[in-house]
Amino acid sequence: MKKQTQDNLQNRYQLHSSQFINIAFGKYTNRNDMVNFIKDPSLVPEPNEFARKRMNWGSKHEVDGIANWLIRCSEGKFPNHTLDDQKDFLFEDFDKLDTTSIDLSSKPDGLSQDEKTIIEVKCPNEGGKLREDFDLTRLPQIFGQQLVLKKNGFPIEKTQLCEWTPHTFRVWNVYPDEKFEEHLISLLKEFTKCLLVGEEITDKPKRYSGKYETYEKAFEVKLK
């Protein structure tokens, strides 16, 4: 996304945490294509019907994930920034050059009342069976959200990744991972340098050599 401020006519780009899986890792769309899409959003291809159906189904049922979080995780305390009150948080000037600046952007599905827990809801596979293990492709978005919200002064201790289908509700606790966050930041900097000054970037980075050890399944319940 590109925007231009009125006060100083800076060019500003926003890199959204939901796309960090591609921006940093080139998982589904390679990083060089992502650079072109950020520069010119008109180049972004329209999602096919299959992808559009899955996205629409997930958006429709986000309220079900939030409702189950309220019942099972909130301890009676209503969360902030959910559903119609969601907020897009910014890590401003993550990188900049002359009159061009790049912000990181994140819009989680909610924030606990004590502001220590990010709520992220996924309603995958149009209500089909959940995969048995943790989906590691969620981590760039999750750690990106933690990075942005910590930059905004929130005392984030964990993310609760909530997976909802009509049959199952499952919650994973994902705690900050300093090593992975450093790795993510380094990959984002590679991307921003390509965006700002045209430095070369590979379509995909080298495989992360660290371990993923900061997540755990909190619980899983059958709904029907």
Image: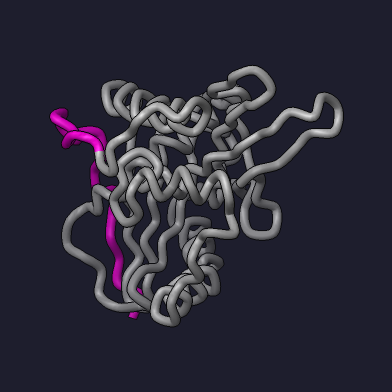
Q: Is residue 66 above or below residue 27?
A: below
Rendered view: 52 above or below 151:
below
Nearer-the-camera pick, 162 or 67: 162
Query: In the image shown, does 139 or 219 lie closer to the viewer?
Result: 139
Image quadrant where residue 72 sits: bottom left
Q: Which residue is depicted at the point 65% across and 51% down?
A: 86
**Count of numbered badges drawn on the protein:** 0
Q: Secondary structure of the magenta portion, mostly?
A: loop
Question: Which residue is drawn at the image coordinates 28% and 28% (left, top)?
Answer: 180
Residue sitting farthest toward the top = 98
| In the displayed structure image, the side of residue 221 where residue 111 appears, left or right | right
Q: Is residue 158 left or right of residue 168?
A: right
Q: How is the image coloured?
A: one colour
Q: Quadrant of the C terminus?
A: bottom left
The answer to if 218 sits in the magenta stretch is yes
Coordinates of residue 124 in the picture (x, y in percent): 36, 68
Name the quadrant containing residue 105: top right
The location of residue 193, given as percent across then percent down, is 45, 25
Q: Is residue 47 found inside the magenta-colored segment of the image?
A: no
Q: Quadrant of residue 95?
A: top right
* Left or right of residue 197, residue 92 in this image: right
Looking at the image, which is closer to me, 121 or 47? Answer: 47
Residue drawn at 33 percent across, 49 percent down: 30
Question: Residue 146 location, x and y as percent?
Answer: 46, 33
Q: Position of residue 90 (x, y in %)?
A: 62, 33
What span is in magenta? 205-224
Identity of the residue furthest to the right in this view: 7
Up-down relation of residue 203 to residue 135 (above or below): above
